[in-house]
Amino acid sequence: MGIMSLPWSLVLALTIAVVSAGDEAALLAFREQISDGGALASWNSSAGFCSWEGVTCSHWAPKRAVALRLDGRALVGALSPALGNLTFLRTLNLSFNWFHGEIPASLGRLRRLQRLDLRVNMLHGSIPDDIGSKFPMMKTLALGGNHFTGTIPSSISNISSLVALGLVQNGFSGHVPPTLGKMGALQYLNLADNKLEANDNKGWEFITSLANCSQLQKLILSNNSFGGQLPGSIVNLSTTLQQLYLDDTRISGSIPADIGNLVGLNVVLIANTSISGVIPDSIGKLENLIELGLYNNTLSGLVPSSLGNLSQLNRFYAYNNNLEGPIPASMGELKNLFVLDLSKNHQLNGSIPREIFKLSSLSWYLDLSYNSFSGPIPNDVGSLANLNILILAGNQLSGKIPDSIQNCIVLQWLSLDNNSFEGSIPQSLKNIKGLSILNLTMNKLSGDIPDALASIGNLQELYLAHNNLTGYSSCLDTLQEVQTKPQDIITKFNC
Ligand SMILES: *[C@@H]1O[C@H](CO)[C@@H](O)[C@H](O)[C@H]1NC(C)=O
Ligand SMILES: *[C@@H]1O[C@H](CO)[C@@H](O)[C@H](O)[C@H]1NC(C)=O
Ligand SMILES: *[C@@H]1O[C@H](CO)[C@@H](O)[C@H](O)[C@H]1NC(C)=O
Ligand SMILES: *[C@@H]1O[C@H](CO)[C@@H](O)[C@H](O)[C@H]1NC(C)=O
Ligand SMILES: *[C@@H]1O[C@H](CO)[C@@H](O)[C@H](O)[C@H]1NC(C)=O
Ligand SMILES: *[C@@H]1O[C@H](CO)[C@@H](O)[C@H](O)[C@H]1NC(C)=O
Ligand SMILES: *[C@@H]1O[C@H](CO)[C@@H](O)[C@H](O)[C@H]1NC(C)=O
Ligand SMILES: *[C@@H]1O[C@H](CO)[C@@H](O)[C@H](O)[C@H]1NC(C)=O
Ligand SMILES: *[C@@H]1O[C@H](CO)[C@@H](O)[C@H](O)[C@H]1NC(C)=O
Ligand SMILES: *[C@@H]1O[C@H](CO)[C@@H](O)[C@H](O)[C@H]1NC(C)=O
Ligand SMILES: *[C@@H]1O[C@H](CO)[C@@H](O)[C@H](O)[C@H]1NC(C)=O
Ligand SMILES: *[C@@H]1O[C@H](CO)[C@@H](O)[C@H](O)[C@H]1NC(C)=O
């Protein structure tokens, strides 16, 4: 009897048996090369492979493995070339394991693959040059947290279905392909923590190209060997862009004046780079911004008053720059701000606008230290009722420490050192029950050191040296750390 005369159903049944046996054999060959610590105990012959841990099969016959999800199972070993036999796989997730060695070339046979997640393993090798012709359906390619090296092959741009490309934390080097913009569906591109380069217009061409990705949401270029001028074409990226990370690079040049075009942004991190120039006024158009990190650059000029338009802003960091002039009063409009750090600009000056002290949303910290601010702390400081840390050290602030500071009821750390405060230390500080560090060193404070300080149960460190203080309570000896100059201590009281 020839095969042609077999009933159709029997042919189908035989086919299923053969093909399924192929998937089972491939899975067993995969397990052969790893130690699983018992995680794959269900992979035994008492049940069909479709019920094995991590295996998902197609709903319809022939039953084929369509997904293998073994993320975070502490698997150790090499990736078997037999994986390439699971030709119906759409999802392969082996992330967060201890796989080592290279990705077997046979994976290139998985033409139906849509999600390949090999993040956080110990894999090495490079991405094959022909990757662009292998995975016509690929949506997510996640290789982050391995030891991959080499360049990013330009053929990757041919995977027009790609939505997310994550190559973070590897050793990729060379230029980023200037053709990436061909991936019209791309939403997420994470190239952080590699050794990628760009030193001239040619190297930065990929940014111009990415302007064609009309759905781009996250662009993460942090911690690479990128240098040269930040390309102006960055302002032409899609307005769908939500997150832009350029930190920890040697990028120079200035922030383009039209950065305000990117109205979809909610996180911008241009920090620890060689970027200079001013903060453009147009930044005030980024009304969706929640986090703005501009620290550790060489930005100069004024803090633009348009920042006051960023009504969603939670965190603004611009420490370690060369910003100068006053803080614009408009910053008092930032009703959702919980961190403001403008420390170590050295040349920010004028009085600190009272509007800043009225920002009761400030909760984590306010750091304006090491600038040239002058004048008194206004009574409004008492509005900072949710603030944990207040650092105003290293300025030319003067006048009395206002009693109203007692209303900063959750302060844990108060540094007013290295200023010109005078008068006595307010007794009312005792009402800040959670205060644990108080630094008033290097001021012109006088009078007795209030006994009341000893009643602050949480006080652990008290720095009072270089003032003109007189009384000293021995009750304070219970503190872990008390620094006063001998000339500050004239009498000791009993508690
Ligand atoms: C994988 O497929 C190849 C050819 O298609 C075959 O020779 C090989 O035995 C298969 N490997 C396993 C483990 O099934
Ligand atoms: C085989 O797998 C089944 C689940 O599929 C499990 O209940 C059984 O304990 C396993 N047998 C062994 C010997 O591990
Ligand atoms: C793979 O598993 C990880 C960890 O469980 C999960 O976060 C990730 O979304 C999965 N990857 C894909 C592409 O589905
Ligand atoms: C991308 O695909 C096109 C058309 O198939 C092909 O001509 C080109 O060589 C491919 N590009 C790369 C870099 O592989
Ligand atoms: C722009 O994206 C479209 C798909 O959205 C693609 O067909 C086209 O090739 C891309 N153009 C460039 C110059 O990359
Ligand atoms: C930068 O990336 C390298 C390589 O991935 C990593 O070792 C290093 O910790 C990263 N540095 C920062 C500041 O994140
Ligand atoms: C942004 O795109 C517009 C329109 O395509 C173009 O005229 C302009 O030169 C681009 N700007 C930059 C800085 O590349
Ligand atoms: C700042 O960036 C440089 C690279 O330009 C890097 O070496 C350094 O580790 C970064 N610092 C931090 C704290 O990330
Ligand atoms: C700031 O830059 C200095 C030197 O350029 C570097 O040592 C330091 O780690 C950087 N700090 C941050 C927080 O990036
Ligand atoms: C800020 O908002 C005001 C009105 O609320 C508007 O007049 C001004 O143009 C805005 N500035 C910027 C830079 O967006
Ligand atoms: C206290 O203030 C002095 C003077 O500004 C400074 O040198 C010291 O580091 C400060 N100590 C703490 C713990 O803030
Ligand atoms: C220190 O305080 C005393 C009074 O308590 C005052 O007579 C003296 O002038 C002050 N010294 C300085 C340097 O302010």
Image (cartoon, rainbow, N blue to C red):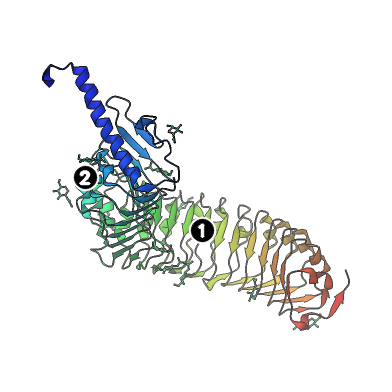
- Res 116 visible: no
> Taking 202 as reference, is 180 above or below it?
above
Between 144 and 335, the one nearer to me in the picture: 144
Q: Nearer the viewer, mark 2 or mark 1?
A: 2
Can residue 103 be seen in the rendering of this structure? yes
Q: Is residue 465 left or right of residue 246?
A: right
User: Along the line of sight, which residue is nearer the eye, 396 or 387?
Assistant: 387
Element assignment for label 2: loop
Given residues 379 and 139, the one toward you in this image is 139
Q: Residue at x 22, y 18 (%)?
A: 9
Q: CA distance from mark 2 to mark 1?
A: 44 Å
Residue 479 image position (x, y, % from top left): 76, 69
Seen in the picture, residue 126 relative to 21 is either above or below; the reply is below
Dot 1 amino acid type:
Phe
Residue type, mark 2 in image: Lys
Q: Which residue is mark 1?
A: 316
Q: Identify which residue is drawn at 68% across, 54% down.
A: 385
Report the front residue among 299 and 351: 299
Which mark is drawn over residue 289? none
Q: Quadrant of the N terminus?
A: top left
Could you tell me residue 425's position as x and y percent? Answer: 76, 70
Q: Position of residue 320 (x, y in %)?
A: 49, 69
Task: In the displayed orientation, state which residue is furthest to the bottom.
Answer: 487
Determine which quarter of the picture holds residue 112. top left
Secondary element under disc 1, as helix, strand or loop, is strand
- Relative horizontal placement of residue 379, taking residue 343 as reference (left or right): right
Which residue is depicted at the point 43% across and 52% down?
A: 286
Rendered image quadrant of residue 173: bottom left
Q: Which residue is mark 2?
A: 134
Place of residue 14 in the rendered image (x, y in percent of width and height, measured from the top left): 22, 24
